[in-house]
Image: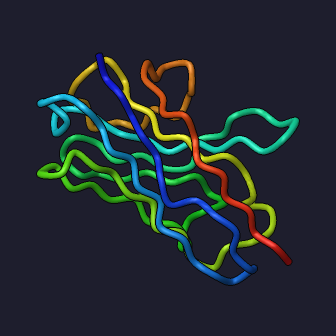
Amino acid sequence: QVQLVESGGGLVQAGGSLRLSCAASGRTFSNYAMAWFRQAPGKERDFVASITWSGRTYYADFVKGRFTISRDNAKNTVFLQMNSLKPEDTAVYYCARRAIAYGDYLVSESSRYNYWGQGTQVTVSS
């Protein structure tokens, strides 16, 4: 059973930074792409960023140049560095993993991810 545990959320002023972490269980973490999604109240869950097993990264247009996704396979952890935060970035952030290993392509549909963390709240004040 795969477990994903996010941490690092909190309250920050506009223009500030936060670093989210997602620790994953399992011995084959390095074989899988990992992704971050976010969901604001009353809105759908949106793709934020993903990193493939080989390290290729993809970003939603609204975070390009501000957010950076990375992974540490030795620690079974994926990170999301968020800079220049805006009030509209306020949401619950979730990490996710697919059941299919490898692949270097973008997968941005939440329905194609099989495992999810519990989420961490990010609130950006103006």
Q: Tell me what residue is drawn at x 64 percent, y 82 percent.
A: 16
Q: Quadrant of the N terminus?
A: top left
Q: Tell me what residue is drawn at x 39 percent, y 47 percent.
A: 22
The quadrant holding residue 3 is: top left
Q: In this view, does 112 lie to the left or right of 78?
A: right
Q: Nearer the viewer, residue 44 or 20?
A: 20
- The extreme bottom residue here reads 15
Q: Tell me what residue is drawn at x 67 percent, y 73 percent.
A: 85
Query: In the rendering, at what x and y percent does residue 98 appear?
Result: 37, 24
Q: Tell me what residue is drawn at x 78 percent, y 45 percent.
A: 40
Query: In the rendering, at what x and y percent does residue 65 appear?
Result: 53, 73
Q: In this view, does 122 lie to the left or right of 117?
A: right
The quadrant holding residue 37 is: top right
Q: Nearer the viewer, residue 111 or 7?
A: 7
Q: In this view, does 111 lie above or below 120?
A: above
Q: In this view, does 55 lie above or below 8?
A: above
Q: Is residue 17 left or right of residue 42?
A: left
Query: In the rendering, at what x and y percent does residue 78 appear?
Result: 33, 51
Q: In this view, does 42 lie to the left or right of 12?
A: right
Count of number-bearing discs? 0
Q: Which of 3 and 48 is in front in this view?
A: 3
Query: In the rendering, at what x and y percent does residue 99 appear?
Result: 32, 18
Q: Quadrant of the C terminus?
A: bottom right
Colour basis? rainbow
Q: In this view, does 70 lie above or below 110?
A: below
Q: Nearer the viewer, residue 29 or 6?
A: 6
